[in-house]
Image (cartoon, rainbow, N blue to C red):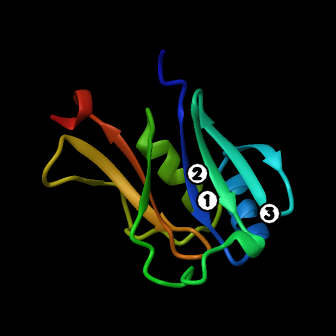
Amino acid sequence: MSVQGAMTLFYYNDLEAASAFYESIGFTLEVDLDWWKVFRMSEGFHLGLVGGDIVPEDIDSKKAVKLIVMVDDVDAWFVKLKDLGLKLDHEEVYSSSRLNLREFSLSDPEGYSIEFGQFLTPLGV
């Protein structure tokens, strides 16, 4: 018995706009249904986008969740997303004040916070 992976679900009013956003930043679309999109981020980890009549009524409430994408070259990701014309939350990659981590963030089309980070030591400690 073992864990084979993980999936985070986000809910959207405009599923197509969200899907286009995640495709534009390089995530691999693996399932493409009218109401359900699944992107592979890495082996065993997926992001599921849910839309249509499955979306909870309070979808527009504060997005109290953050997707953190751990990468091996945060500077390259920063340049890639900036070159795509996406609005990043800061003008440059910054260092965390609490962890040995370099990071930057942005929001997706419906306000979910997406953070790209690179630990400089195992798990940043």
Question: Mark 3 is on which residue type?
Answer: Trp
Q: Around disc 3, counting alpha carbons within 10 Å, would you say few (fewer than 14), some (14 to 19), or many (20 or more)?
A: some
Quarter of the figure that contains the C terminus: top left
Q: Quadrant of residue 31?
A: top right
Question: Which of the labelled discs sits on residue 35, or is there none?
Answer: 3
Proximity of marks 1 and 2: CB atoms separated by less than 8 Å: yes
Mark pair 2, 3: CA separation: 29 Å
Q: 107 and 65: which one is in front?
A: 65
Q: Quadrant of residue 30?
A: top right
In the rendered image, residue 74, in percent from the top left (x then y), is placed at 42, 43
In the rendered image, residue 122, in percent from the top left (x then y), is placed at 24, 27
> Which residue is the site of mark 2?
80
> Which residue is the site of mark 1?
83
Question: Mark 1 is on which residue type?
Answer: Asp
Mark pair 1, 2: CA separation: 5 Å
> Is residue 16 positioned above or below 67 on the image?
below
